[in-house]
Amino acid sequence: MNISILIVDDSPLTQSQLSDIFIEAGCQIVDQVTDGISAARIYKKNKDKIDLVTLDITLPGKDGVEVLKEIMAFDPSAKVIMVSAMGKDQIIQECLQVGARNFITKPFNKDKILAILSYVTK
Ligand SMILES: [Mg+2]
């Protein structure tokens, strides 16, 4: 898949799990960011180079919901997939209402992630 992705997650393990899946699928990683403030700033600076953002919900600085709101206000056509631990259904519903395209939950299912990627970016 020829998709450029910004990965936002404060967990190095999650970062590497996601980047491994994306790189294996032929995607490019634009950047990997570990806090909400940098995430929003880097999206705004590189909007045209980023096809998709994977956005963790629990982040230092600004949480994923705040970052999502900021990105959607800046670029209503942004494609953002939320990343979350299980059991955050209410927050995920809020994110979908704000404009997130989909969500993935940990532990990751590679095939499901790739299906969501191709659906969201087509
Ligand atoms: Mg986190």
Image (cartoon, rainbow, N blue to C red):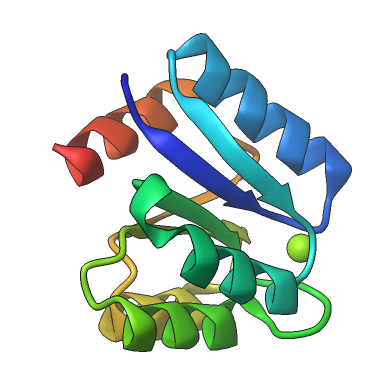
Front-most of residues 29 and 16: 29
- Quarter of the image for the N terminus: give it: top left
Q: Is residue 38 left or right of residue 70?
A: right
Looking at the picture, how far across and down is residue 37, in whole percent?
Answer: 72, 79
- Quarter of the image for the C terminus: give it: top left
Residue 101 in view, yes or no: yes
Looking at the picture, how far across and down is residue 101, in whole percent?
Answer: 28, 61
Picture quarter with ligand 1: bottom right
Q: How many labels does the image show?
A: 0
Q: Residue shown at 42%/36% (left/top)?
A: 4
Position above or below: 67 against 49: below
Looking at the picture, how far across and down is residue 89, in whole percent?
Answer: 47, 74
Q: Residue shown at 44%/23% (left/top)?
A: 27
Q: Residue shown at 54%/83% (left/top)?
A: 65
Residue 109 in view, yes or no: no
Looking at the picture, how far across and down is residue 59, in whole percent?
Answer: 76, 72
